[in-house]
Image (cartoon, rainbow, N blue to C red):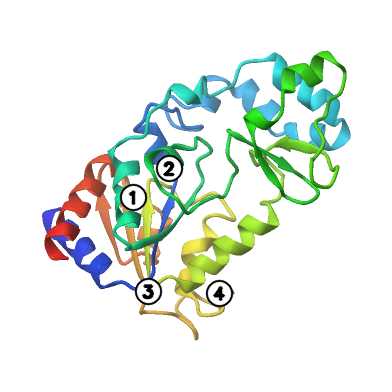
Amino acid sequence: MEKLINRAAKDLVESKYAIALTGAGMSTESGIPDFRGPKGIWTKQPEAERKAYQTYGKFQANPKEYWEERLSGPSLFGDLGKVAPNPGHYALAELEKMGILKCVITQNIDNLHERAGSKRVLDYHGNAFKLRCVSCNTRYDLEEYDLQKLRDEGRLPPLCKKCGGTVKDDIVHFTEPIPLDIAEESEKEALECDLMLICGTSAVVYPFANLPLMARSRSGTLPSGLYGTGYRTTVKIIELNAEPTPLTHEGVSDYLIQGKTGEILPQIVDEVKRAS
């Protein structure tokens, strides 16, 4: 593993535009449960998964009922505000401060990258601490709306202060499209990068899992067969995962460093400092 860590540090130092993709593996190391693991939310509460697939349809059909239900029950994740970033989050923030890492694109909704100090974060599946207008994609901090007061006064759903559109929580629910601004910016980053760190994601949830494939293609649209015309060999794709993923098996990533991101990323940062 030491050789791979040294290799990753060397690749990062030599990169011109490095980005990171992060998934549930980083959050579980902070104590946040995943969805389908042995102790996952859906594993323990299969009925909750069924309801989750109905959530976005409920919002579309009746935003007021959606908000009343959301405000009446506890979060499946517990109090995310009490969860702390782990060394992996801080390591990515440090790489950004060093000018090496340009962006983090995360599947996680827990706001831990921001709390660790990362400045440029694209919340691909939304952020549990924000609200979003479904008409203009303007985002608000939770504190900007007194949701309980709106509920007590019968004024749900909240309305956008910019365009008057309906506001929902920023979390992207099942069947809900990825917000266009985030989708476009994420694809742009994937096409521009010359190094991609993939940290703690199984790479099976789409369209997020398309981003490494886009990084491997010149145009963002894969040709027939990954290794056909347009395949980019110049981009480095490095996986930091507990287990191999489809990206490993299909040769999309250059190499896998197997283990916990909270242990591997700080070691990579230390090596980067030595090599810089």
* Pointer 4 or 2: first along the chain: 2
C-alpha gap between disc 1 and disc 4: 29 Å
Where is mark 3, residue-wise? 235
Where is mark 4, residue-wise? 222
Q: Residue 8, image x and y in percent?
A: 23, 62
Q: Is residue 207 left or right of residue 261?
A: right
Q: Which amino acid type corresponds to the residue marked 3 in the rendered image?
A: Val
Residue at (84%, 43%) from the top-left corner? 165
Where is mark 1, residue-wise? 92
Dot 2 alpha-carbon crowd within 10 angstroms: few under 14, some 14 to 19, many 20 or more: many
Dot 1 alpha-carbon crowd within 10 angstroms: few under 14, some 14 to 19, many 20 or more: many
Quick check: marks 3 and 1 in contact, CB under 8 Å?
Answer: no
Q: Residue 221, image x and y in percent?
A: 59, 74
Q: Is residue 95 above or below residue 64?
A: below
Where is mark 2, residue-wise? 113
In the image, 265 versus 231, the foreground residue is 265
C-alpha gap between disc 3 and disc 1: 19 Å
Quarter of the view holding residue 83? top left
Residue at (31%, 67%) from the top-left corner? 254
* Pointer 3 or 1: first along the chain: 1
- Quadrant that contains the C terminus: bottom left
* Pointer 2 or 3: first along the chain: 2
